[in-house]
Image (cartoon, helix red, strand yellow):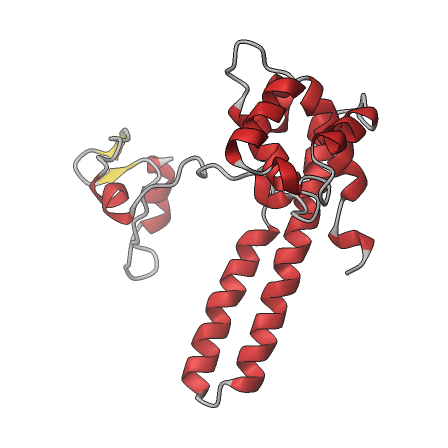
Amino acid sequence: MTDLMWARTEEVTILGTLLLAPKRVEETTGLVAEHFDPANGHQAIFTAITRVTDAPQADHLAVLQELTRSGHIQGIGKGKGAAYLHELMELRGSGDLMWLARAIAQCAARRTMSLGARRIIQIIEGQPDWDVAMETAAAELLKLETTVDDPMDTGPIGGLSLLGDFVDKPRRALPWVIPGLLRRQERVMLIARPGTGKSMVARQCV
């Protein structure tokens, strides 16, 4: 994969910074462990950081203890263990953590898009049943469409609700334009012969 698919520099920078100040993970809202490269144990490190934020002494030692407790410490840095955490801290940055987090999440979205596109090609080229191929490919395309949205937005979309809740929600009563017949923002269609006063009625309702 090309460098566009991985934000490795941003990963080590943000992890090094968070190791010294785990509570700053709040500045990376939307970033999750799955966005990181698992090769050097970055997913495990980020997970450990998020788990020690409420500790009385939230620092790199607390992260080290959490990695040891979870059994991930030996795999960090391809076997470097605790020494790799010190390497990351030396590479810490002073930049905007949210900017770094967004760069990491965007690369993760690229990888998701790439894998999804490959699945669609495999479905189209390998599924002999037309209906099954098109339905499955359409479902994959829908997944890709959601990936195009903000990769840092992992929370619920404001204003959305279940269909039943939406239908049952009481409507706000708007003021009457013609009492008992037409409310504001509603529409009515008048059908009559020319010259019978349709325009006059419309002007009176404005």
The residue positioned farthest toward the left in the image shown: 180
Q: Please provide percent x and percent y for residue 159.
A: 40, 36
Q: Please provide percent x and percent y for residue 180.
A: 16, 37
| Picture layout, residue 126 above or below residue 50 | below
User: Which quarter of the figure has residue 36?
Assistant: top right
Asked whether 44 or 18 is in front, the reply is 44
User: Which quarter of the figure has residue 178?
Assistant: top left
Q: Please provide percent x and percent y for residue 104.
A: 70, 41
In the figure, is residue 10 to the left or right of 177? right
Q: Which residue is drawn at 64% across and 19% down?
A: 61
Q: Residue at x 58, y 53 (%)?
A: 147
User: Which quarter of the figure has residue 50?
Assistant: top right
Q: Which residue is drawn at 58% across and 10% down?
A: 57
- On-image quarter of the C terminus: top left
The residue positioned farthest toward the bottom in the image shown: 128
| Picture layout, residue 186 above or below residue 124 | above
The residue positioned farthest toward the top in the image shown: 56
In the figure, is residue 43 to the left or right of 85? left
Asked whether 132 or 15 is in front, the reply is 15
Asked whether 154 or 183 is in front, the reply is 154
| Picture layout, residue 145 above or below residue 182 | below
Q: Which residue is drawn at 66% across and 56% down?
A: 111
- On-image quarter of the N terminus: bottom right
